[in-house]
Structures are given as C-alpha cells and as structure tokens.
C-alpha cells in the first residue's frame, strides 16, 4: 500500500438553500476542490459520492452537469458516516495503486423537521418507534445515569461548539449561546433541549485524493459497521443504546484507525467529532479515547475540547453550529481539518496542528474515523 | 362490534392471563430477539424457536415524545423507553405513561395491547405498549 494525500478540498457552506438544487450544491464543492488541487479536468480516475437522501445517481448528476462524467462513479450510503465511507473507498483505491487520483464528494438536502427514514418499516413509524430524537434522549439518559455527566455539562458542550462556530463563515448558526440560554430552550425529549441538538440541513463537500505527495496525508480512513448483537434485541437502529459488552462502531473504527496510522489519542492536535446532540459529543470523546470512559463529565467541566484546551474539539463549531447534511458532514470535517493542517483556518486555527482526527457515526450503525497528518 | 387488526402480524398475542410478545430464542446461541426473525441476528443460525415473553417488564430507560414523529398515528405526548423482559431481552416500546415524574428506573411494568389509532374504514388498530403497574 502506498501513501495517500489530500490534493484539494472544496466546500459549499452548510445551511438552507431553497433556491439551489442538490446538484448545484455538489457542483460548487467539486469545482472548488478541483481548483484547489490544481489538477486538470478529468485528472481523477474514479469518483465516490456520499449521500443518504440524494436519490438515484446523485453523484452522477453532479459530474454530468460539470462535463466530468466518464469515470466510474459510485454513490455511497452509510448513514451519518456516508462521506467518511466514500473517503475510505477513495483512499483505498489510491493506496492500492488502482488509481493515482480520485474524487470524493458528499452532498445532501435534508428533509425538514424530524427526519423520515426508510430504515423504519411502516408499522414502526405508525407505532411511534421512528422518533429519532427520543433514541438520542435515551442514550443521553443512560450516559447521565452511568457517569457523572449532568444536564449543565450537556449545555456546556453545546455552548462550546456554538462559541467555536461564531468564527466559521461556513456554519449555519454563528451566534454564541450561554449555558443558561441552552438550558432554557424547549425540551425536545427529556433530557435534551432544542439547543443541544443539531439541525438537519443542506450542504456539500469535496476532497481530491492523490498518490502525489502534498503537505496533508490521509494516515487512516477506517469505516466500521455495528457488531452482531450491538443493536437492541428489538433490532432498533442505534447501537450503544442498551447493549452491554460489545464494542461500539466508533470504538472499532478508532481502533482500526490507530493501527493504520500508528498513532494514538495522545498524538492528536485537533479533532472534529460527531455531535448530533450534546450527549453524543461526550460519548464520541469517550469512545475515541480523548478522555477516559465515564469521565466525560469531568472532561467537559475541565474545559475539554475548548479552543484554549490541550486538544481543541470541533473548532468548526461542530454539527451543532454547522447543521448536519448527512452525506456531506464527514467530508466537511475533512475539509476543515485540511485547512487546519495547512495553517489556513483563519480565526479558528489551532496553532501548529499536525495530527487531526475526523469522526462520524450514525444510523446503520456505521462509524468512520479519518486521521490526517502533515 | 368494530373490526380490529394488529399493527403488524407476529408481534404479540393475547392469552387468557394477559398479552405476550412473540420473541425468538436461537436454538444455537440461546439469545432472545424481538420481533421473532427466522435467522438469529446474533449468530446467524437458522431455526429460532418462538418464545412468548412478558407481560411483566422493568423500565430501563425512558423519555417522553412531545411532537409527532414521522408516520406515527397515535396520540402525543407518549412515553418511550427501553423495557427489560425475562431472559434479559430489552425492547424499545411505547409507554402508556408520558409524565416523567411517574416513571423511574426499575419501575414494574406490564404489557398491554390496546387500540392506538383507527383506520379510515373504522378498523381499530392494536399495538403493544407497557403500562406502570402502580398508579
């Protein structure tokens, strides 16, 4: 296997863009990434497109519209980790020597409100079992019961992400929020308040991968889906909710990524992790080994993840500030971290960042961990 | 007497001493799963044996759903939780009680099968839920 490098990145901001088609969002990100990579048209020999709600041939439509069709195009669905899965496939194609240059992109226009998912059979929807925020709430309750994470800690995680997001022009929400404001926002599903949850939205991101050395290397791109038995006995879609004794997809993907990169949590300088809700952000930190298991409450209270801490987490503002376009969110993290490693992240730059980790996890269950180094 | 139907076949049965969920016990690894499936989701073995579980359960995790999730046809708010049944089986289920001050970990629950909504043709659609045993 040979090293894989990030040659170029592009991003369409995350938000709501009623006047733009899904294809237009993807075109924006792909053009920007190709221009950033300074590779000619058609330099990439394969394309991998992450999307969940994009429908048939979403990636093909983008490359057709840009006059760039003709290479193999694969649309990739792995829930919230779709963009990471596309990146893992693209990186493997370059590492194996199959292609010298590939295009990876992700795009999404999420439906509004609580997301309808074909994951749930019609009877489960009719019976009220497709209540996605309620699953997040149950996981949050379990976290709070089994450790000393308190409601105020959840609010502080959200406040930290929103404070970071103020400096990110690509984020949907750029307003600092106090712990008090977050706690006072409406309850969605106890214990989660509205301002502790990320908003589904729209956006696109693209990454050009190459065998030709650049300053930013893809040191690992690991995707893992759930372990047999690591979902509820009822086969409910969210792992880690009530299972015991089986590793979570994030733990498995992280272990693979550490092994592939020859690195560990102590080597990291900056992290972008899944923060669909504030409890998920703490769980992600624990599962990635950024703090000890069941020490996430202390980690938050000690300022863990804040820009002034040893290891800043979500300098972009996270999904809580950016919103979550499923197919694009993982690649949005990779774009942000590439800027961080290039020293080009402007006011949200983590000084001297050389090792970065991106993490997504979601329905399926799937988790992706990407490690970038310079 | 209006007609009734189950929200989905093969989820539950009503017995003389109360309803039961239709789970499956794997003949190879012994694990329980619900709803019953022909292949064990833990070990992949064929030939799971139908096992009736309930009606007694204990509350493990819980919250309240305040706004209507996609496709849901019952009333809001409703309770929503993970219930532990005999044999260690944990199921996600609707709870008849949505007032969180009346719910707590370990609370004794019993399975109920009751009308959740009415079809356009007047058929009452039955679904399962768990109800606190104490008032």
Image: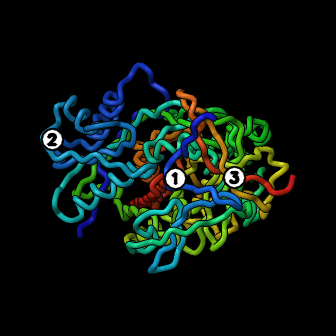
Residue sitting at x 58%, y 43%: A127
Q: Nearer the viewer, residue B95 or A144?
A: B95
In what element is the residue under mark 2? Answer: loop
Of the numbered discs in the image, which one, if any, rests on residue A272? 1
Would you say A304 lies left or right of A124 here? right
Q: Is residue B87 above or below residue A152?
A: below
Say whether mark 1 and mark 2 are on the same chain. Answer: yes
The furthest residue to the left? A70
Quadrant the N terminus of chain A occupies: bottom left
Image coordinates for residue A103, horizontal then vertical, percent: 25, 46
Residue under mark 2: which chain is it in? A
In what element is the residue under mark 1? Answer: strand
Say whether mark 3 and mark 1 are on the same chain. Answer: no
Image coordinates for residue A331, horizontal then vertical, percent: 40, 47
Residue under mark 1: which chain is it in? A
Where is mark 3, residue-wise?
A: B112
Residue sitting at x 51%, y 33%: A169
Label 1 to label 3: alpha-carbon separation: 44 Å
Image coordinates for residue A222, horizontal then vertical, percent: 38, 63
Label 2 to label 1: alpha-carbon separation: 31 Å
Mark closer to the chain start, 2 or 1: 2
Where is mark 2, residue-wise?
A: A42
In what element is the residue under mark 3? Answer: strand
Label 3 to label 2: alpha-carbon separation: 62 Å
Quadrant the C terminus of chain A occupies: bottom left
């Amino acid at each position: 296997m040979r090293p894989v490098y990030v040659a170029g990145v592009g991003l369409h901001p995350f938000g709501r863009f009623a006047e733009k088609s899904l294809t237009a969002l993807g075109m924006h990100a792909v053009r920007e990434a190709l221009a950033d990579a300074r590779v000619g048209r058609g330099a990439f020999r394969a394309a991998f497109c992450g999307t969940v709600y994009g429908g048939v041939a979403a990636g093909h439509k983008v490359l057709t519209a840009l006059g760039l069709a003709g290479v193999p195009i694969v649309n990739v669905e792995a829930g919230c980790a779709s963009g990471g899965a596309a990146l893992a496939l693209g990186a493997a194609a370059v590492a194996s020597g199959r292609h010298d240059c590939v295009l990876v992109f992700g795009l999404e226009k999420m439906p509004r409100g609580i997301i309808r998912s074909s994951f749930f059979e019609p009877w489960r929807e009719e019976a009220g079992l497709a209540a996605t925020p309620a699953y997040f709430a149950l996981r949050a309750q379990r976290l709070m019961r089994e450790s000393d994470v308190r409601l105020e800690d959840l609010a502080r995680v959200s406040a930290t992400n929103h404070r970071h997001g103020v400096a990110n022009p690509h984020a949907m929400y750029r307003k600092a929020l106090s712990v008090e404001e977050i706690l006072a926002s409406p309850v969605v599903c106890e214990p989660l308040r509205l301002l502790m949850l990320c908003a589904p939205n729209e956006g696109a991101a693209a990454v050009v991968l190459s065998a030709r050395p650049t300053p930013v290397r893809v040191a690992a791109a690991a995707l893992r889906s759930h372990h047999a038995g690591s979902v509820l006995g009822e086969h409910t879609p969210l792992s880690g909710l009530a299972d015991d004794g089986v590793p979570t997809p994030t733990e498995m993907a992280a272990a693979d990524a550490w092994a592939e990169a020859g690195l560990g949590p102590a080597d990291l300088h900056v992290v972008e992790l899944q923060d669909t809700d504030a409890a998920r952000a703490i769980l992600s930190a624990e599962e990635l080994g950024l703090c000890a298991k069941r020490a996430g409450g202390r980690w938050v209270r000690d300022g863990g993840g804040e820009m002034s801490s040893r290891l800043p987490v979500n300098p972009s503002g996270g999904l809580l500030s950016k919103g979550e376009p499923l197919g694009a969110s993982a690649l949005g993290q990779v774009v942000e971290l590439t800027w961080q490693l290039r020293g080009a992240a402007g006011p949200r730059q983590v000084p001297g960042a050389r090792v970065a980790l991106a993490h997504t996890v979601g329905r399926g269950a799937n988790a992706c961990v990407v490690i970038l180094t310079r | 007497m209006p007609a009734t139907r189950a929200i989905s076949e093969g989820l539950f049965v009503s017995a003389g001493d109360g309803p039961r969920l239709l789970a499956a016990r794997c003949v190879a690894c012994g694990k329980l799963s619900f709803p019953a499936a022909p292949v064990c989701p833990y070990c992949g073995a064929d030939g799971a044996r139908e096992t009736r579980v309930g009606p007694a359960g204990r509350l493990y995790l819980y919250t309240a759903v305040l706004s209507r999730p996609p496709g849901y046809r019952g009333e809001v708010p409703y309770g929503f939780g993970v219930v532990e049944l005999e044999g260690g089986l944990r199921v996600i289920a609707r709870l008849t009680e949505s007032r969180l001050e009346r719910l707590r970990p370990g609370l004794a629950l019993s399975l109920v099968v009751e009308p959740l909504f009415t079809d356009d043709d007047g058929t009452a659609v039955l679904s399962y839920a768990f109800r606190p045993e104490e008032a």
